[in-house]
Amino acid sequence: MSKIEIACFNLESAIIAFQNGADRIEFCDGLSEGGTTPDFEVIKKLRSETDIPIFAMIRPRGGGFTYSDAEFQQMKEDLVNLKSLQVDGFVFGILDENNEIDEEQNRELVELAKPLPCTFHRAFDRAKGLENSLQKVIDCGFTTILTSGQKPNVSEGKENLKRLVQLANDRIEILIGGGLRSTNIQEIREYTHAGYFHSSAITDGGSFANPDEVIALKNK
């Protein structure tokens, strides 16, 4: 049985994930933008209705992962505010203008988040170089990388994902996500030997997690 994080873009999905066995919730707004910083009032409500870990996205907008000074300031303020709402961790990732891991800015956010853990999100899949980027993310102090192996989805990225798990060597958790469903999780798990998996569990092109899919992901 795998550990499962469900990416939720609304309160309803998060409650579905919680009630159907998810191990952790990644909570964000902006489904069409691939996830942005969530609404603080919704996080408050979610916290009062669930007792599994909630990791909050820190991302001021969709699009690329290089941010202006004002956007970076916004990220710091949002992180501090969300930290006060008893979330359990954060999800973010910053690249520089050369699509390399911005060690200075990422490290600053990781420090602000302490003692809470941080996941470097799929900006990793746009970063230059697999091994080099992995080492930089580890050096910044992240506990987890969410990745499809620097490919469009986990099926295409499975060789890289297997390599990342080997290279990480338990120094950081490789969280596998990007086109992950109950139909392919078993194959991906057996190939990569990863232990933690990430999916929105949305199966109808809508915006809500499918309870049956959450259960199937958990039990495959």
Image (spheres, rainbow, N blue to C red):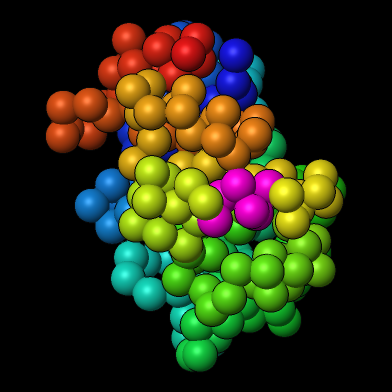
- Residue furthest left in the image: 205
Question: In this rendering, is residue 165 above or below 123?
Answer: above
> Tag count in the figure?
0
State the residue at coordinates (73%, 49%). 166
Rendered location of residue 190, percent (x, y): 56, 28
Rendered location of residue 160, percent (x, y): 54, 56
State the residue at coordinates (64%, 36%). 194
Rendered location of residue 193, percent (x, y): 64, 34
Q: Give the quadrant of the N terminus.
A: top right
Rendered location of residue 29, percent (x, y): 36, 47
In reply to whether residue 155 is colored magenta, the answer given is: no
Q: Is residue 15 visible?
A: no
In reply to whether residue 161 is colored magenta, the answer given is: yes
Q: In the image, 116: left or right of 65?
A: right
* Chief secondary structure of the magenta portion: helix
Q: Which residues are magenta?
A: 160-165
Question: In this rendering, is residue 176 above or below 79?
Answer: above
Q: Is residue 188 visible?
A: yes
State the residue at coordinates (51%, 90%). 98
Question: In this rendering, is residue 103 above or below 30?
Answer: below
> Camera-side residue: 155 or 39?
155
Q: In the image, 14: left or right of 193?
A: left
- Residue furthest bottom in the image: 98
> Camera-side residue: 105 or 125?
125
State the residue at coordinates (28%, 57%). 33
